[in-house]
Image: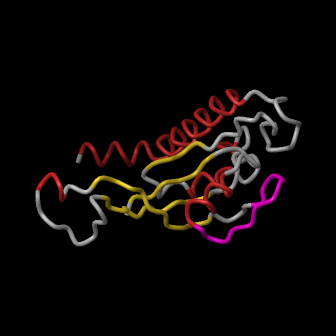
Amino acid sequence: MLSVGLAGKPNAGKSTFFKAATLAEVEIANYPFTTIDANHGVSHVRVPCPCRELETECGKCRDGVRYVPIELIDVAGLVPDAHLGKGLGNEFLDSLRVAEAVIHVLDASGSADAEGNPVGLGNYDPMKDVKFLKYEIGMWLYGILNRNWERLMRRVQA
């Protein structure tokens, strides 16, 4: 089953999206770090079934549509310098390690600052979140590679 992580700053709507997509009961509140431990749930993605194209009957198909299960992982919010351990950054980032894909959940309304504190509608530029999330995840991955570089090189050379 495909595993997809939900990443974003605190109070961006990750748990709201997770709850809507999985129908799982999770705590949702308008303050940073409502989510501490990662939430795991299953949702389904509608995809066309190849049965019509191949002219064969499939067991898990409804009217030419398959509902493919995916695991969603709702991690706690990331703050600037999370890759250095700020907030509970490394712990939260490590929850994403098992994900095969990551969805960046952004607060497009601009109503929360970089740390998820309410600042009023339109008072924060959401593009800052795009840049910060890309940077944090990149630095986290760089740190993993850097810590394990010698071991990785020995493996490649063997």
Q: Residue furthest front?
A: 63
Q: Is residue 94 shown left or right of residue 56?
A: right
Q: Residue furthest left?
A: 55
Place of residue 110 in the rendered image (x, y in percent of width and height, measured from the top left): 77, 33
Q: Is residue 113 shown left or right of residue 20?
A: right
Q: Decide whether residue 38 is among the magenta residues.
A: no
- The vertical placement of 147 against 57, above or below, is above
Q: How many marks?
A: 0
Determine the image quadrant of residue 111: top right
Q: Is residue 150 shown left or right of residue 84?
A: left
Determine the image quadrant of residue 23: bottom right
Q: Main secondary structure of the magenta part?
A: loop
Q: Residue at x 34, y 42 (%)?
A: 153
Q: Is residue 103 shown left or right of residue 69?
A: right
**Residue 27 vs residue 8, the one in the foreground:** 27
**Residue 70 vs residue 87, the one in the foreground:** 70
Q: Residue at x 71, y 39 (%)?
A: 107
Colour theme: secondary structure
- The vertical placement of 12 against 66, above or below, is above
Q: Residue at x 66, y 52 (%)?
A: 14
State which region is magenta. Answer: 23-34
Place of residue 6 in the rendered image (x, y in percent of width and height, measured from the top left): 58, 51
Quadrant of the drawing holding the N terminus: bottom left
Place of residue 18 in the rendered image (x, y in percent of width and height, measured from the top left): 61, 59
